[in-house]
Amino acid sequence: MSNASIGTRIRQWLMTGVSYMIPFVAAGGILIALGFLLGAAAAGTDGIHAYDAAKMGVPTNEGGAVTGFDLLNVGNWAFIIFWLGKAAFAFFVPVLAGYIAFAIADRPGIAPGFVAGALATGLDGNPLGTGTGFLGAIAGGFIAGFAALWISRWPVANWIKPVMPVVVIPLLASIIAGVSMVLVLKTPIGALVTGLTDWLNGISTAGLVVLGIVIGLMMAFDMGGPVNKVAYTFGVTGLAAAGAVASATEFQVMAIVMAAGMTPPLGLALATQLRKKLFTESERENGKAAWLLGASFISEGAIPFAAADPIRVIPSIMLGSGVTGALVAIFGNELRAPHGGIFVFPLVSNALTYVLAILIGTAVTALAVIVAKGIGNKAE
């Protein structure tokens, strides 16, 4: 990595943060979505406000702590699952910042990175919370990491070297990162986040279709790489911003993200079945695995095909994902879970049209790949 370019290093640092963030996003987001689902079932209606539905019948004290639990009460289970998910989901922004800093400065960067990330969201009701979300976490993570790296290079006496990585560096870097977040980054990044949220909430159907196409193209462009992760993080951050409202544009964006990320491996798997002679034996075997990977929202299932023939495959899967994103926007599907593929389809609004959008995108991807590979190829 020492010989890598600056751009490559930045991408590696960012991807480290994202890779550690995803388990919190997946576990927390799916638990929250299940809480919504069970809460609505407990209330006997669809579309009810998740918190009001989930807290039905749960004995609590004045502080809100659960003091009793009925194993047979669906509303009780909804309440518990919903708030377990909120607990896990609350960490994803601090984890993003913490592990960006870790990637830059190793272990001494973790504490200041988490401090910056916690200040980005106001974790645990911190009054110094900046409300800068994942954008603030990224900036704060880089500041914390570089501060820790800079301090680690100070020439110090031998007697203090043992405590530098466990006390001095985390302490000083936390002060630098924290002050930077509160006094420098809060206003500009907070304004950017607010503007982005206002724009998203005010977007028209036509605008959402265009956004769906753009997100679809991004999800397929590098199949789990930095561009894909930017689109995914945009969707996940929207879930966090939307909170527990009954309906929001952010839920539509998340539905677009997941559907568009499923179609590349699914489309390639279908193509290997429709025109086997256009693919090698190894690709046909990868195609069998791609069915499950695509169904599970693992876009990386398309990578073996793209690596072998990027000129034909990448534009084809981008076309299919762009179509999928547009259709999901048109159908108005919403999704509260940030991951899971077909396993969270019960949490999708209008699931039938959602499946239809994915099937159409899969077919478009497969046909585009077959046509592209057929050009100049005499094999039948």
Image (cartoon, grey):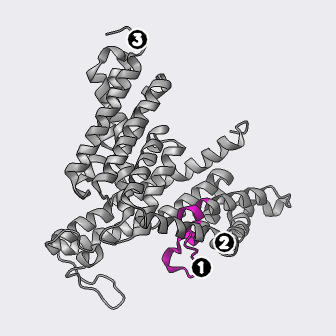
Report helix, strand or loop for mark 1: loop
The segment highlighted magenta reads 117-138
- Depth-wise, is mark 1 or mark 3 nearer the camera? 3
Residue 325's label in the rendered image is none
Q: Are marks 1 and 3 in contact (CB under 8 Å)?
A: no
Point out residue 65 in the picture as x, y percentages from the top left corner: 33, 83
Report helix, strand or loop for mark 2: helix
Q: CA distance from mark 3 to mark 2?
A: 59 Å
Q: Are marks 1 and 2 in contact (CB under 8 Å)?
A: yes
Q: Main secondary structure of the magenta part?
A: helix
Q: Earlier in the sequence, mark 1 or mark 2?
A: 1
Residue 178's label in the rendered image is 2
Mark 1 crowd level (few <14, some 14–19, many ≥20, 10 Å Cα): some
Residue appearing at x 31%, y 58% in the figure: 335
Q: Is residue 136 magenta?
A: yes
- Quadrant location of residue 282? top left
Whether residue 9 can be seen here: yes
Q: Is residue 185 magenta?
A: no
Q: Amino acid at mark 3?
A: Asn
Report helix, strand or loop for mark 3: loop
Q: Which residue is mark 1?
A: 128
Q: Earlier in the sequence, mark 3 or mark 2?
A: 2
